[in-house]
Image (spheres, coloured by chain):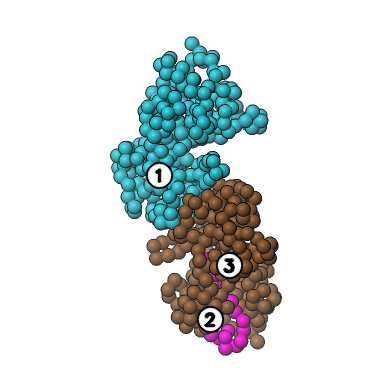
Chain colours: A cyan, B brown
Amino acid sequence: MKAYRGFLIDLDGTVYKGTEKIAEAIDFVKELERRGLPYLFLTNNSTKHPSDVSDKLVSMGVPSTAEHVFTTSMATANYIKEQQADAKVYAIGEEGLHMAIEECGLKEVEEGADVVVMGLDRDISYEKLTKGALNIRAGARFIATNGDVALPTERGFLPGAGSLISVLSVTTGVQPKFIGKPESIIVEQALEVLGTSKEETLMIGDNYATDILAGINAGIDSLLVHTGVTTKADLDLIEVKPTFTINSLAEWTFGE
Amino acid sequence: MKAYRGFLIDLDGTVYKGTEKIAEAIDFVKELERRGLPYLFLTNNSTKHPSDVSDKLVSMGVPSTAEHVFTTSMATANYIKEQQADAKVYAIGEEGLHMAIEECGLKEVEEGADVVVMGLDRDISYEKLTKGALNIRAGARFIATNGDVALPTERGFLPGAGSLISVLSVTTGVQPKFIGKPESIIVEQALEVLGTSKEETLMIGDNYATDILAGINAGIDSLLVHTGVTTKADLDLIEVKPTFTINSLAEWTFGE
């Protein structure tokens, strides 16, 4: 087994399922901490601030600080900053997105935006969508935190960021640049934070279509764990396999 | 010139432009009235009640009653009623849609719907979209008043019904059945109201992609008038031409 020096770890379906913890995953993260191996939790949830995510993890017994969490909102704000450091941004999203934009030193505006950025917004309104559309029609670049079309909840599958974002792409005819998994951008941003190279980093997740494809698209090794979305039967139909597949993180053997 | 016995007439771009009347069109409608030729205004605007549309027309000097107006909301409610007379409907839309459903004797519900119907709703919310998605995932049929992606206004092009509707189609993977122009359904429903046959009816409008295609799709003759969206240059690029094309309705010659 190759001795990976850095770990990017998905959350929902990998470390917990909703409010239920996955014990083998928590033991795995504790082992990473014991060995002093750097890790970063990588989530397409754009709505929360990393400190809130970390609080939830700590309450479940996962060793974590806010610095261990990297959200697609943070990746999106970083990406905009890299492209244009003084970009004026019109943002449609929740607290996690607005705070990431602010923490990057970017300025939010209502009109005359250089960039329209959109993520999941459960307080969506026609006026917000109107301002997004008008800014894009006036020439703003269009960036989206993630393309997930559905959000698993206790009520069932609710509309995800990708479905809300389609209002702006359909009405303007402009396709957004997506940042979150399965895109490589979020992985590349995360590697900069983690400080490890592509060759020595492993992407771990339960969802082939987001987590594993993000690893493959970014050119890093991937580990699929069957504790969430993707089943063994699903995987049989897929040509490009993850580097590793296991039933639970208890099965993982650390290389030396 | 063929002597048409019935006329389906688009509104915005054909009879008026926003708040500005088109004098030649008003004279044309007056001539229809003088000759006792039946006409029906056919609109993809799902938000208004026919009496409100008629009030606007009367204020511009157009001879009209509520019975002269047929909206895509009325066509949609009629269509649902024909398919299933006791259908329970979850509706996302404005007053025009809710009133059309009520006037058809259909019952609106929040869950357990047989049909989810959606039109333009400028009071859209995540909760409405959630209920729409959950009803469709539970097996409700999905019907949309119209697919217009943009709404021309004084502020510019705002998100139209077709863009809001994409939230539900993207999140559920279910494509809606569209009712409004350019679909043939609204034309067929309108002919039933007008009481004339396909052979003796003319569809008049300014927009090739909606009005004229609706006529073509329904198998009736069409008249494009260059007072709105479609220009002569646009038309040069189109293979299937309208039956007639004129600059203004003042040019129309009635057959005997």
Q: Of A190 and A42, which appears nearest the observer?
A: A42
- Please give the residue where the numbered disc 2 appears in the rendered image: B64
Chain bearing mark 1? A
Give me the chain letter of mark 3.
B
The residue carrying mark 3 is B102
Q: At numbered mark 3, what does the secondary structure look like: helix, strand or loop?
A: helix
The three-letter amino acid code for the residue at tag 1 is: Glu
Q: Judging from the image, what secondary structure is the residue with disc 1 in? A: loop
Residue B205 at x, y percent in the picture: 55, 72
- Is residue B168 something that shows in the picture? no
Magenta-drawn stretch contains A253: no
Viewed as shown, does residue B184 lie left or right of A17? right
What residue did someone put label 1 on? A94
Neighbor class of circle 3 (other Cα within 10 Å; few <14, some 14-19, many 20+) is: few
Estimate the x, y position of residue B125 in percent, counting from the top left: 47, 54
The quadrant of the rendering that contains the C terminus of chain B is bottom right
- In the image, residue B33 lies in the stretch drawn in magenta: yes
Q: Is residue B63 above or below residue A31?
A: below
**Looking at the image, is B243 positioned above or below residue A218?**
below
Q: Which mark is in front, 2 or 1?
A: 1
Residue in the image at 53% along x and 81% along y: B64
* Mark 2 vs 3: CB contact within 8 A: no
- Sequence-wise, the earlier of marks 2 and 3 is 2
Which chain is home to disc 2? B
| Amino acid residing under circle 2 | Ser
Residue sitting nearer the eye, A157 or B171:
A157
Per the image, label 2 sits on a secondary structure element best described as loop
Magenta span: B29-46
